[in-house]
Image (cartoon, rainbow, N blue to C red):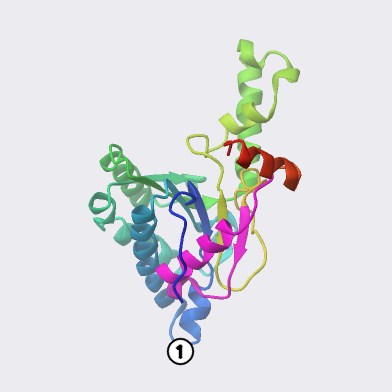
């Protein structure tokens, strides 16, 4: 089915929970690592299409801190995939900047170096920023932000001298996502209906979209379907429907 998109209302920031790789592989009699490899192909596809549509930020939940509890061979395969996928020239071909967020202390040194090199190599690309959440959890991120704020308070920095100065803006500045806007649209594939400790602070007013499609099968048509659903919603941010409609009439968005 062809979904006609309003190109003036493309989400600036799309965040995705890429779920279903393992189940996709097992249903085909393959190892879970086979599904993760197929998931990399889906990343290439969706990255290219988001760039074409004019999305400015694409944030992909690649590996959570909880995923460290998975079998060692699966973790090793995932880390290897990170290395090989970053060899891809998709970033340069599509003028995409690469960024990574998460607690990288547990990431193997070879992988950390490759992540850093890719960030440096793509730093001047400005068509879209693709952000990989790796060894990431939102609760870790919020705790980390609060620890930073307390450190600045203890150091006597003026902006942190009084606890009354701690507000939403200050906390947001200390999150690992401080360089980009909050997601407009959060997509989760694979049929699960939960957030799984992903961008909890940032998605306070994001539109949520869940689908049964496993991530390796999530293609351009599925992306268009998600964006069409987003465009058919009214984002009110706590206001009434009448207020939002009045702003639209007056030319405000």
Q: Residue furthest bottom?
A: 29
Residue 96 relative to residue 22: left or right: left
Q: In the depicted view, which residue is nearer to us: 248 or 3? A: 248
Residue 95, how many percent across, how many down?
Answer: 27, 47
- Residue 19: which quarter of the image? bottom right
Q: Is residue 212 magenta?
A: yes
Q: Position of residue 80 (x, y in %)?
A: 36, 63
Crowding near pointer 1: few (<14 within 10 Å), some, many (20+)?
few
Q: Quadrant of the C terminus?
A: top right
Residue 156 visible in the current orientation: no
| Relative side of 101 to 38, left or right | right
Q: What is the number of callouts on the image?
A: 1
Q: Nearer the viewer, residue 193 or 111?
A: 193
Kindly identify the residue that appears in the image at 49 percent across and 80 percent down. 24
Relative to residue 75, is residue 146 drawn left or right? right
Q: Nearer the viewer, residue 170 or 76?
A: 170
Residue 10 coordinates in the image, percent (x, y):
47, 52
Q: Does residue 236 appear anywhere in the picture? A: yes
Residue 166 lies left or right of residue 99; in this view the side is right
Q: Tell which of 245 and 121 is nearer to you.
A: 245
> Which residue is the extreme one toward the front?
249
Percent x, y of residue 241: 73, 47
Q: Residue at x 37, y 71 (%)?
A: 37
Secondary element at tag 1: loop
Indicate whether 162 appears above or below 145.
above
Residue behind mark 1: 29
- Would you place residue 164 above or below residue 211 in this image? above
Location of residue 217 by image quarter: bottom left
Report the residue at 61% width, 41% height from top. Answer: 248
Indicate yes or no whether the magenta region holds residue 225. Answer: yes
Q: Which residues are magenta?
A: 207-236
Q: In which quadrant of the rendered view does residue 129 lie?
A: top left
């Amino acid at each position: 089915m062809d979904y006609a998109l309003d190109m003036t209302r493309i989400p600036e920031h799309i965040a995705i929970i890429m779920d279903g790789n393992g189940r996709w592989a097992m249903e085909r009699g393959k190892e879970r690592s086979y599904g993760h490899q197929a998931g990399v192909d889906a990343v290439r596809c969706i990255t290219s299409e988001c760039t074409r549509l004019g999305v400015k930020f694409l944030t992909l939940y690649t590996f959570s801190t909880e995923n460290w509890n998975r079998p060692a061979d699966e973790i090793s395969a995932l880390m290897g995939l990170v290395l090989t996928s970053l060899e891809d020239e998709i970033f340069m071909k599509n003028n995409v900047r690469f960024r990574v967020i998460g607690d990288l202390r547990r990431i193997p040194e070879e992988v950390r170096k490759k992540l850093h090199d890719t960030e440096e190599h793509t730093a001047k690309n400005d068509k879209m920023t693709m952000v990989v959440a790796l060894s990431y959890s939102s609760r870790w991120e919020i705790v980390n932000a609060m620890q930073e704020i307390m450190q600045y308070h203890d150091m006597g920095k003026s902006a942190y001298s009084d606890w009354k100065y701690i507000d939403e803006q200050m906390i947001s500045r200390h999150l690992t996502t401080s360089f980009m806007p909050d997601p407009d649209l959060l997509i989760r594939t694979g049929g699960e209906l939960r957030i799984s400790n992903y961008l909890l602070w940032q998605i306070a007013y994001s539109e949520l979209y869940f689908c049964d499609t496993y991530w390796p099968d999530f293609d351009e048509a599925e992306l268009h379907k998600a964006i069409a659903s987003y465009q058919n919603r009214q984002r009110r941010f706590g206001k009434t429907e009448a207020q939002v409609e009045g702003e639209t009439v007056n030319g405000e968005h």
